[in-house]
Image (tube, grey):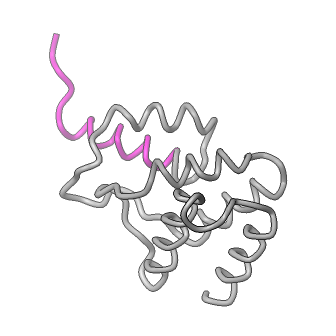
Amino acid sequence: MRSPDNESLTADRTQALRALVQLQGELGAAITALALYPWDSADELVTVTRNDLVRVLNGYLNGELTARDWERWAEALEGRDDVGFDEGSGELIKEFIFESATPEIFEPLTPQLARQWLSRLEVNS
């Protein structure tokens, strides 16, 4: 049996990253699929945008995601070399992911915080 070539592995990894970043399907399944691939990468395969953050925040505020889901989403992305950040918003996006992944250091993930982040994302666009 032939092993998958590098190109198809990269395509699968990109698909797994995109599913997580864009919340395509169930969060746990996306995190599990991505766990098959290393965090290190020479290339940024997927770009996180403001729209991705807004999707997470609105999902939380609409009850589709829990605070723990929000945190797990950020934890799964934080520090990955295969994820890039939207040009012009990169620092704000990195701050959001870092603070969301470590609420014990910053502040609990609450509806009030979600609304504050939505305002920041809108003001800084």
Whether 15 is among the magenta residues is yes
Residue drawn at 43 percent across, 43 percent down = 15
Q: From the viewer's side, name the closer residue of 116 and 17.
A: 116
Q: Is residue 28 above or below residue 61?
A: above
Residue drawn at 78 percent across, 72 percent down = 115
Residue drawn at 38 percent across, 35 percent down = 35
Quarter-of-image position of residue 78: bottom left
Residue drawn at 51 percent across, 64 percent down = 97
Query: Which quadrant would the N terminus be assigned to in this image?
Result: top left
Q: From the viewer's side, name the closer residue of 88 and 107.
A: 107
Residue 113: percent from left, percent from top: 73, 70
Quarter-of-image position of residue 2: top left
Query: Residue reaching furthest top?
Result: 1
Residue 14: percent from left, percent from top: 37, 47
Whether 24 is among the magenta residues is no
Query: Residue reaching furthest right?
Result: 62
Residue 98: percent from left, percent from top: 48, 65
Q: Is residue 16 left or right of residue 57?
A: left
Quarter-of-image position of residue 38: top left
Q: Is residue 42 left or right of residue 88?
A: left
The overriding secondary structure of the stretch rendered in magenta is helix
Q: Which residues are magenta?
A: 1-19
Query: Which quadrant would the C terminus be assigned to in this image?
Result: bottom right
Query: Residue reaching furthest front?
Result: 105
